[in-house]
Each structure stands twice: as structure tokens, then as C-alpha cells.
Image (tube, rainbow, N blue to C red):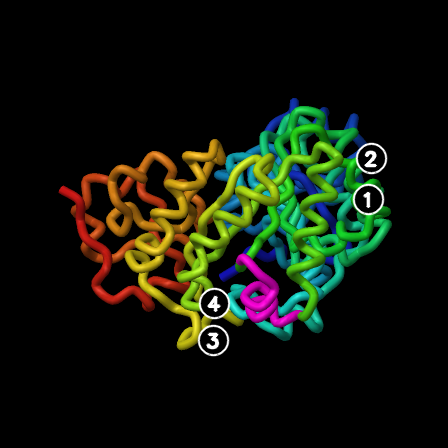
Amino acid sequence: MGLKIKNYTQGFKIVSLALDENTKKDLICDNLDFIFINDKSLFLFPEDVNLEIDYELIQELSVRSNYDIYEIWPDGRLFLRFDTTSIDNYFFITGKCNSNCIMCPSPECSRKYGEDIELEKLITFAKHIPSDTSHLTITGGEPFLSGEPIFDFVSLLRDKFPRTEFLFLTNGRIFSIDKYAKLLRKSLPSNSIIAIPIHGSDAEIHDSITQTKGSFEQTVLGIKRLLRYGIRIEVRIVISKMNCTDLDKLSNFIIREMPQIEYISVIAMEMTGNAYKNKERLWISYKEAFSFASEAIKKLISYGIDVKLYNFPLCTVDPSFWMICEKSISPNKVRFGEVCEICDYKKVCGGVFAGTINMEKDELKAII
């Protein structure tokens, strides 16, 4: 059951949460809308409206943190949009995408009909986020489908968050057009990584996975333009049945064509959306995926390219690779098998996606 303010009549709002007088004063000085909890009462500012008392709701909000951000919908429902205790906060720009990756965890309908978030809403959201937040992700869909206006928003992020680490998730195709690569260079926060997937060593493999002709050429050109402008690039490789035997060739391609990238992330699939729909064509076990990737990873590292492993449970990876395994799954999506309860390494393991736990067939083993 979600949170809801009873008999709410104030319309749609983006609000911060204030649990003490100092935070209240801070938010007033910043001219921000916020909810203030005081003496078991709930107030909406700057209107100073005393909302209907709901002790269950007050109890739920009281255990949250100052500066958490909520959307209040016109019917009074509350949705948490920024958690000050998390490093997984993000801006979702649009559900639409100009590729239709066969292994995408989002469904095809989202790509075609996904919501575009209004720029003014994104700006309001950004104004509420504390300027000292450590990390923010920009994602979609394809966030840069918004065209030139998105770069004004990126500039706002650069100016407000000078010490924040940014991760931009994009297919990179727009940056095959030099004008957009230049706009990104001009607007980009200094501490930013642009994460772009390459699905194969040639157009045949890559384009069959994106289901978009010409996407390989555009992606590679986009990466090279951004590198030429000194922009830091993470290359992402999502392993599936469709590209697992190409990883050696793909590593050679990256070493030859773009050795100056920041690092490579080798990623196990999240089996929802398109990925689940096409599971017969895509799914391989974690151990198989790692087996296909291990030699390519060694080669990349030998050429001075850093590699990270995402979404792999530790028990499916050779222990000599554990040092590059990341706890990459958002906490609300992490699941563990029954056998994991007795594992000595559960606390440091990244677990399995909720949408993938039913795909693994007795792979997970307790490490004792």
C-alpha cells in the first residue's frame, strides 16, 4: 500500500521533507515547497496548510530523512523520488528510445509510447536536491532524444552540483552528429561518465541486438567524437546468447579503436521487459556468461583497460575476479536464493535481479 494524504486538495507538487526546524528554515530560504512534520502534525509549505492528521502517514514519514523528495499527485498519493541515504538516485528523462534492444529490461511499448518528462519538472526536481549529493544518474529510455533542450538541463546540473559524480546512460547514437557532441562538451559537469553499450564487434551482431540498422556505425562514431573532446566514456557489454562467442573479437575491437576509454563494464542481463520476452534467444547462465567473458577480461586488463563485472553473484565467478565484481543492482531489485542465507559472503555479494531469480537453475551456491 502506497502513501497517501487524505482529503488532499493542493494539486501536483514536488516537495522536500523537513523533520526539524533547521531544515524547515533552510527550505524556506531556498523558496522550496516542502512537508514539515511537527508535534504529530503535517504541514505543507510555503502555504502553511495543516494537512489532515493521519498518524500512520506521519509515522511513515518520520523515519525518513531530511531533504528526501516526494511527488504529491493531485489525488494525494506520495511517491519517493530522491532518497538522501541512497547512491542510486536518478533523473528519468524519457521512456522512449530510438533503439529497440532485444535484451532491454524495459518493454517495447515503453520505447514507442514512453513518457517524456517536462523540462520544467526536471528543473524543479533538481532545485530540491541538495547540492552536496554524491551521485546522480541520468537515464531513460534514451535521455538525449529530448534534443537540444536537454543540454540546458545538463548545464543546470553542472552549475548546481560542482562536486557531484554524474553517470549518463545513453546509446550514444546522437553523438555521431558533431553538433550534439559539442553541446555535451560545453554543458557537461566535470565529474561525469558517459556509459554507452557496444553489443558486438561488428554491425551484424550489434544491429541484430539493437534491432536498429546503422546503430553500430552511429554508436562507434559517437564514442570516438566524445573521446576526441576529452569526455570520459564507460563502454558497457551486456552478455547474452547472441554475443557471448564474440567477446574476444569485441575486446580486440575496443583495444584497437578506443583504448582511451575510462573502463568497461561486463554485465549480466536483467530478465524483464524485452529480455524476458526473448529469453529463449538470449538467456545463458551466469557461469556460462562468465566463462565466455573471462579471457576477454584478462586481455583488456593486460592492455591497461579497467574492467568491472556487474550483476554477477560471487558464487558464479572465479574468486580471482571477485575484486572487479560490483554490487550493482539497486537495493529494491536485489534478491537472494534460499541457499544464500548460509553464505559467508552474502553481505558483500551483489545478489540477483528480482526479474532474474527464477531464471537461474541451481547455480547459486553458498560459499562457506
Query: What residue did someone put label 2 on?
Result: 186
* Residue ID at (42%, 36%): 301
Q: Choose the circle earlier in sequence order: 2 or 1.
A: 1
In this view, the mark in front (2 or 1) = 2
Q: Amino acid at mark 2?
A: Lys
Q: Quadrant of the C terminus?
A: top left
Badge 1: residue crowd in 10 Å (few <14, some 14–19, many ≥20) = some
Q: Are marks 4 and 1 in contact (CB under 8 Å)?
A: no
Mark positioned earlier in the residue sequence (4 or 1): 1
Label 2 close to label 1 by CB (< 8 Å): yes
Residue 348 position within the rendered picture, expressed as x and y whole percent measured from the top left? 31, 38
Amino acid found under the numbered disc labelled 4: Thr
Q: Secondary structure at mark 2?
A: helix
Label 3 – label 1 distance at C-alpha = 35 Å
Which segment did they paint magenta?
A: 201-212
* Residue drawn at (70%, 66%) of the image: 214
Dot label at residue 278 = 3
**Amino acid type, callout 3:** Asn
- Mark 2 is surrounded, within 10 Å at the Cα level, by few (under 14), some (14 to 19) or many (20 or more) other residues, namely few
Residue occupied by mark 1: 151
Q: Is residue 239 above or below residue 274?
A: above
The residue nearer to you, when weighing 116 against 45, is: 116
